[in-house]
Image (cartoon, rainbow, N blue to C red):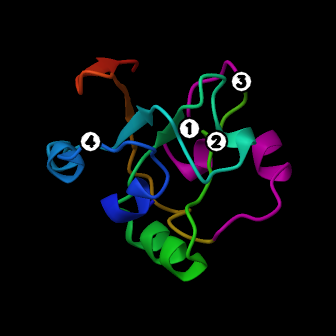
Amino acid sequence: MTDVRQLAKHIANPPLDLEEMLEKFDNPTTIIYPNAIHLPQSLLAADGSVAVRITKDPFCRSLIKRLRSPLVSTSANLSGMPAAATFSLIDEVVKTQVDYTVIWRQDDQTHSQPSSILKLEPDGGFTKIR
């Protein structure tokens, strides 16, 4: 997603201070929100929650805005294997099983870290998952 307004459309009871809360995170952070709405059931966990990250990447932001829809993604790795830090480290099996690969930053060798994962609790606090 690109911003809090888009996120709020998919959370049943977003915290009133959602925007201020998210501005505190400097690093990429995925948050698990309870009570997701207006999303396919296949994207939701058994408890009805959904994990969302608001992207700051210019290409992803542009793509989401042009599509007028959030993007769904998984880590580009095989189950049980570490996440790839660069495009060149993505297993060839993964690359051959996707429908399309965007030509964007494929030569970039800057190692990136997986996002932090936090779960929003009913009291407004967070539990760190990763």
Do we see residue 16 in this rendering?
A: yes
Mark sitting earlier along the chain (1/3): 3
* Element on which disc 4 rests: loop
* Quadrant in which the N terminus is drawn: bottom left
Judged by depth in the image, the label closer to the viewer, 2 or 4, is: 4
Residue at x 80%, y 54% (from the top left corner): 98
Residue 76 is marked as 2
Residue highlighted by disc 3: 79
Residue closer to the observer: 85 or 5: 5
Residue 84 is marked as 1
- Marks 1 and 3 close (CB-CB < 8 Å): no
* Element on which disc 2 rests: loop
State the image coordinates of residue 103 (x, y, percent, origin top left). 62, 71
Assign the magenta stretch its main secondary structure: loop
Judged by depth in the image, the label closer to the viewer, 1 or 4, is: 4
The question of residue 49 being in magenta is answered with no
Whole-Å distance between the Cαs marked 2 and 1? 6 Å
Residue at x 24%, y 27% (from the top left corner): 124
Whole-Å distance between the Cαs marked 3 and 2? 9 Å
Residue at x 60%, y 77% (from the top left corner): 67
Residue closer to the observer: 64 or 84: 64
State the image coordinates of residue 110 (x, y, percent, origin top left). 38, 51
Q: Which residues are magenta?
A: 79-102
Mark sitting earlier along the chain (2/1): 2
Q: Amino acid at mark 2?
A: Ala
- Marks 4 and 3 close (CB-CB < 8 Å): no
Residue highlighted by disc 4: 15
The question of residue 90 being in magenta is answered with yes
Label 3: how many Cα within 10 Å (few below 14, some 14–19, many 20+): few
- Marks 2 and 1 close (CB-CB < 8 Å): yes
